[in-house]
Image: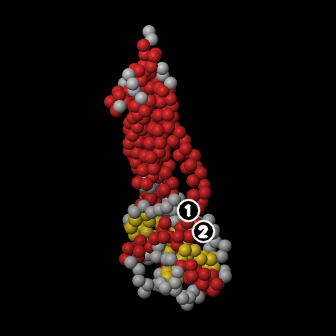
């Protein structure tokens, strides 16, 4: 079966290569769209990585990016006595434009007023608590702005140097920059007003219990868990991006199935006489179908491998050209696309095999 299927496909090498390219394009489209969605859907992950368990905001605040929260420090100080609260860290945060080597850029500035006595891992302090006069950015913002370790940027009248560059974070749309709290006070100039309160729990009580106690103590406050805060950022992406992804994935599947189906159908029709001979000498419909399915499987496998390599290459080139082009290739998604490619091969073989089964073996012996 396999030698016959291989011979049928390679009889026209040019057509075979074009067909592989068509399947590869469909796989490329599907994988890139999925990887983009995975990359963008990681937005908000930074709030899970920060040491806080709960986030206290002004009542009415929906999420960190699309609404403003203004709190007085005294409101946060009053939460220290609630059972289960180990510390409440005032946080200043705002999307702000700054000057990077003569070019206007923007980032989400975050500053944590952490008590020096609070025990935090060294890596957490290095990443989120830069020394005075410096700030920390990730590789995405570094490529976008051209800033590197030691370079200076100006925030209003305050100049800060890049302390170090972290690996690319999950924040694709609005990259974060962590600044020292004293510097943030000079930049924002808001006095005793802060954006959020980051609550670190002492243990013994659940997040929900402590959140409920905080809201009962001060009805003007709203409390998010770290997961809810991150999810609120991703909500807009899911609601706006997911329907588009569904359409593009459907298009990719249809294109791939059409390319494989057209190629296999053409290769089959051109050899109708040979298939008629097979049926005349006793070849069963199942035997003939396995030949067609083998052709579909070989074509689809070649297209999948080429498409996978192309998707990874395109993603790397695109991220170099556009730092915000954040992709995340997951084995689960790649496996899913492989299963989808197998489904394309199966669907694409149905039409040709029906044509073969309709062939009358007697036509082989006609002049």
**What residue sits right under mark 2 in the picture?**
63
Is residue 25 placed above or below 49 in the rendered structure? above
Which numbered marker is on residue 234? 1
The N terminus - image quarter: top left
Q: In front: 103, or 340? A: 340
> Label 1 neighbourhood size at 10 Å, few (<14), some (14-19), many (20+)?
some
The colour scheme is secondary structure
Q: In x, y percent, where is residue 182? A: 49, 79
Front-lying residue, 208 or 146 = 208
Furthest residue toward front = 282
Going by the image, does 73 lie left or right of 323?
A: right
Residue 328 circle label: none
Say which residue appears at 42% left-offset and 23% top-offset.
279
Figure check: 81 above or below 297: below
Say which label, 2 or 1, has the lower sequence index.
Answer: 2
Expressed as whole percent of the image width and height from the top left, the position of residue 113 reads 49, 80
Residue 16 visible, this angle = no
Indicate the position of residue 139 as horizontal and vertical percent values. Answer: 42, 60
In terms of depth relative to the viewer, which is nearer, 324 or 309? 309
Say which element carries label 1. Answer: helix
Q: Residue at x 39, y 40 (%)?
A: 301
């Amino acid at each position: 079966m396999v030698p016959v299927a291989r011979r049928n496909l390679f009889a026209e090498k040019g057509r075979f290569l074009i067909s592989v390219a068509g399947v590869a394009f469909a796989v490329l489209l599907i994988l890139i769209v999925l990887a983009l969605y995975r990359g963008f859907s990681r937005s908000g992950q930074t709030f899970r990585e920060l040491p806080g368990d709960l986030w206290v905001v002004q009542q009415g605040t929906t999420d960190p990016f699309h609404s403003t929260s203004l709190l007085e420090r005294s409101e946060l100080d009053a939460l220290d006595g609630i059972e289960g609260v180990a510390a409440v860290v005032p946080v200043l945060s705002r999307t702000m434009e700054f000057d990077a080597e003569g070019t206007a850029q923007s980032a989400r500035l975050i500053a944590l007023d952490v008590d020096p006595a609070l025990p935090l891992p060294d890596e957490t302090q290095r990443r989120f608590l830069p020394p005075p006069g410096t700030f920390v950015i990730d590789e995405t913002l570094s490529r976008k702005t051209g800033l590197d370790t030691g370079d200076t940027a100006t925030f209003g009248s305050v100049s800060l140097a890049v302390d170090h560059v972290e690996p690319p974070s999950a924040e694709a749309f609005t990259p974060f920059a962590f600044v020292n709290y004293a510097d943030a006070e000079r930049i924002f100039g808001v006095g005793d007003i802060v954006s959020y309160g980051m609550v670190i729990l002492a243990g013994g009580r659940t997040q929900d219990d402590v959140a409920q106690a905080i809201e009962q103590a001060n009805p003007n406050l709203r409390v998010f868990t770290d997961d809810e805060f991150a999810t609120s950022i991703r909500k807009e992406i899911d609601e706006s991006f997911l329907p588009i992804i569904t359409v593009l994935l459907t298009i990719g599947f249809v294109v791939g199935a059409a390319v494989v189906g057209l190629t296999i159908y053409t290769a089959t029709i051109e050899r109708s006489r040979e298939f008629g001979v097979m049926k005349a000498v006793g070849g069963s419909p199942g035997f003939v179908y396995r030949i067609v399915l083998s052709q579909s499987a070989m074509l689809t496998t070649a297209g999948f491998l080429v498409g996978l390599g192309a998707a990874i290459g395109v993603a790397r080139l695109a991220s170099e050209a556009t730092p915000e082009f954040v992709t995340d290739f997951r084995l689960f998604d790649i496996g899913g696309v492989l299963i989808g490619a197998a489904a394309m091969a199966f669907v694409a073989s149905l039409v040709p095999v029906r044509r073969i089964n309709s062939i009358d073996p007697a036509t082989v012996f006609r002049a």
